[in-house]
Image: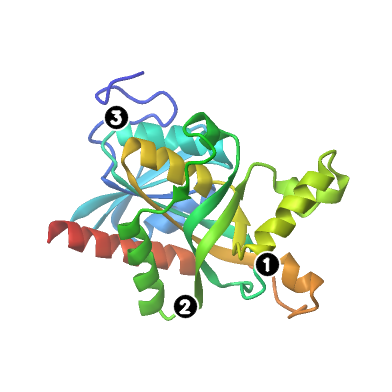
Amino acid sequence: MLSAHEKQYHIGVGAGDVGKYCIIPGDPGRCKKIAAFLDQPYHVCTNREYNIWNGKLLGETVTVCSTGIGGPSTAIAVEELVMCGATTFIRVGTCGGIDLDVKSKDIVIASGAVRQDGTSREYAPIEFPAVSNADVLFALREAAAELNFTNHTGVVQAKDSFYGQHSPARMPTCHQLTQQWEAWKRLGVLASEMESGTLFTVGAYLRARCGAVFTCVWNQERFLAGLDTNDDETHNTEDAIRVAIRAIERLIAQDKA
């Protein structure tokens, strides 16, 4: 393992190059947009799927770093950012609704995640829960309420196979996938995405504060139930970004106090 004073192998930065507070989208193309919400934003570096920007909030350096899609690249980003001095992470991204109350454009805040991924199992036994840090969770909830966004807080599903969710019937494991999906519905799981299970588990191991906020792209269960079939699919994550920014401001203020 590289020391904190060396450039990290995957993300290409070292100690002093990033802030304690990090916003981590999946898509490298979203980083510049997120950084625009910060004061004095500037590009740090790009390597592989990791696009890194810095800026300021309340005088503190805040880093935006993309993780790519899924658990493996997310774990690498968090590991190496922590090595460089990061302590607090908020994932910003999109999700697909599961619970019928979750509509397109709604904000979903993850209190925990179903660990239907592979990466987190190399950090902790499956019995270990993947949960958000309480400080980050409460900051996200308060931010969403303050911004008057329709929002939902609860458990999300974190899976490895995007098409296993969208087209389970064509998969060799269709029966298993369908049974698990039905279980998540009955358990009130809000939405499906691909990184939070890894983020929460790796964060627990590294003693980092982690949370996650999403924009719901669309809810296939509402469509199948004949509810709001005219709902427009959305990929605009600006509301989720604004929630994350406001939450980071709250955390900085609390930490300083």
Q: Quadrant of the C terminus?
A: bottom left
Provide the secondary structure element on which disc 1 rests: strand
Type of amino acid under label 3: Gly
> Can the viewer see residue 237 in this picture?
no
Residue 215, horizontal then vertical, whole percent:
55, 65
Q: Residue at x 70, y 47 (%)?
A: 162
Whether the residues at callouts 1 and 2 have beta carbons within 8 Å, the answer is no
Q: Residues within 10 Å of mark 2 (few under 14, many from 20)?
A: some
**How many callouts does the rendering have?**
3
Dot 3 or dot 2: first in sequence order is 3
Tell us which disc is closer to us: 3 or 1: 1
Label 3: state its secondary structure.
loop
Q: Indicate which disc residue 149 carries.
A: 2
* Residue 130 pos. (x, y %): 47, 47
Residue 148 position within the rendered picture, expressed as x and y whole percent measured from the top left:
42, 81
Position in image of residue 110 (x %, y %): 48, 59
- Disc 2 residue type (three-letter): Phe
Label 3 and label 2: CA atoms lie apart by 37 Å
Return the mark for residue 218.
Answer: 1
Which residue occupies 39% across, 33% down? 79
Q: Residue at x 54, y 33 (%)?
A: 121
Label 3–label 2 contact, CB within 8 A:
no
Is 229 situated left or right of 69 in this image? right
- Kind of residue at badge 1: Trp
Which mark is on residue 14?
3
Q: CA distance from mark 1 to mark 2?
A: 16 Å
